[in-house]
Image (tube, rainbow, N blue to C red):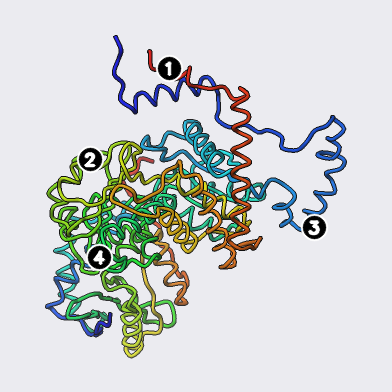
Amino acid sequence: MEKEFSDTAKYNEAAVIVSESYKGKTRVIPKVPIRDLSDFSIYYTPGIAEVSRRIAADPGMSFELTGRWNSVAILTDGTRVLGLGNVGPHAAMPVMEGKALIFNYLGGVNAVPITMMIRSSDEFMAVARALEPSFGGYNLEDIESPKCFFLLQNLQKELNIPVWHDDQLGTASITLAGLTNALKVTGRRREDSWIVLLGSGAANIATATLLGSAGFDLGKIILVDSHGILHPEREDMDSLMINHPWKYDLAMKTNSERIKGGAEEALKGADIVISAAKSQPGFIKKEWIRSMNRDPIVFALANPLPEIWPNDAKEAGASVVATGRGDFPNQINNSLVFPAVFRGVLDARAKGVNMDVMVTASNEIAAFVKVPSEDHIVPSMNDWEMYPQVAAAVAAKTSEIGLARKNGTRGQFLSIATDIIEENRRFYQKAFDNGLIKDFRGVIEVGKKN
Amino acid sequence: MERKIEIRNAKESDIDSILGMIARLKKLNEEFDTRMRVSPMMEENARNHLVDVMKHHEDYVFLVAEIAGKTGGFIKADIVHRIYYDPEKEGRISEFYVMPEFRRLGVGGMLLNRAKKILHSKGVGLIAVEFPSQNMIASNFYRKLGFVGLTSIFGKETDSQE
């Protein structure tokens, strides 16, 4: 008898089978011609000594004479992996490998997963500092909060390469992109919109901060966590000041009307709700949506299950509904952001990345949707042309604000990004077509039969 | 947003607000070290103490910041006598709190400056402050104002088996 699998169970099983078969998802392959073994005298000793001498004289040349320019480390301590929690660095590896795969496939970036057996933030900082010469950027991944805020802030300050924490910045950027088009669809302006952020974890804290940088009024943003609406009179303010200064700061700057209570009170009359709270349909109640302003915008972003099913939200009057899932319209998906942003900052050999760059990326992603509608506020991962476009906008912005080591125009960067991404795809496709990368469809079918 | 801030002596009618602030302050101290866990008698003891403080102006400086009609912060300094040292009179800030709502308006600085002035006028030659050793925010705050560490108080519970 054929067993019914939920999508998640089916993917779980397939992932195990694929992991057993392939044992890792990326590999290192030479990219220089090796005509015969005497060429090693060029690529390695003795010839390569001269390249070392040049970099020793000017460490910046490491971006031009080695693969550093296109290398990103995915750094994690495995303390908050997906929805699994603190599974540790060994168990984090398959997830980081998946991230590396997406980096490469969509952005042409050589991403190296590095999972670390470390305890403290200081140790994390020390490893990140030590590895900087090898990489053109860092992607922090799946790190518990509030440690992730501390690490992002301090590494961005200290290092001379872009440091990105995807759970914060990636999610915030794609949320802003989606919101930009949702505002268009519902005829709203950024500065007038009342926004409720349900959940005050890494994603929503970053989203609030980014919205503030993108022309939204922080006073009209209300954050809600498990203790209710965030406001300065809350009993835990001093504790937040010590333990979570980022949330404390937002408590001071948001909710200018000092509304108190819980999610229900927060949502009354609000224009937008962005929920990154609890993977449980029904967490957001239909009557809460009904109490919102006309044509409300509902982003229910918890995975795998949204806080309210889209049809329930629609029934309650929501105009635009977005989730984190690919089987509903409007998927708010980080994978639309990080491969492109990194393609851009790497092409500009950027020294850092900041809110301006993120706003640029979000605007560009939003603009890629030419005619936004209720069911189409963000591009899909199939929109290949979006990646080089966003990369070019990011690189040009980086150049404009003085963060680039390599300056250029948007047009120049577009051509660079397009070439890199397309060449990488061609290379991969060729290997796949020639059977050097084996098709796994047979393997998955085995999974289905079990 | 402009808010009128007035620094004045604490009054009887401020006590409830001040007790609320003391409760927040002590609860925070508890987070730094469980040896400073808040007593169930805290409120009653604090109330009695504050009433006493108001009767002895010569031994204390006890100010509040009234902001837009609300008691938004306070400072209490105890004048202690250092019999072995010069200057002999020390004004020791034992309680100092500004409600989060009114932070970043310079209220803390105003309270501290006024307290300093009053202490000086009372012949106090040294201003000092006590706070939990683990409170790095307070430590950095006072260091920036030119305070330096003078004494350390170490603690240990007496019921440990040794």
Q: Nearer the viewer, residue A247 or B147?
A: A247
Q: Residue furthest top?
A: A1
Q: Please rate how many residues cluster around mark 2, counting C-alpha atoms within 10 Å: few if below 14, some from 14 to 19, many from 20.
A: many
Disc 3 is placed on an element classified as helix
Look at the numbered discs 2 and 3 and tell me whether their residues touch, using CB distance below 8 Å. no
Look at the numbered discs 3 and 4 and tell me whether their residues touch, using CB distance below 8 Å. no
Report the chain holding disc 4: A
Q: Which residue is found at the position 16% from the left and 57% from the top?
A: A292
Report the chain holding disc 3: A
Amino acid type assigned to the residue bearing label 3 in the image:
Ala
Q: Which residue is mark 2?
A: A309
Q: Nearer the viewer, mark 4 or mark 2?
A: 2
x and y percentages locating residue A261 in the rendered image: 16, 57
Amino acid type assigned to the residue bearing label 4 in the image:
Asn
Q: Which residue is mark 1?
A: A445
Amino acid type assigned to the residue bearing label 2 in the image:
Trp
Direction from residue A413 to residue A332 in the image, left or right:
left
Q: Quadrant location of residue B99?
A: bottom left
Q: Which residue is found at the position 28% from the left and 79% from the top?
A: B1
Q: Which residue is mark 3?
A: A57
The answer to whether residue B71 is seen in the rendering is: yes
Amino acid type assigned to the residue bearing label 1 in the image:
Glu
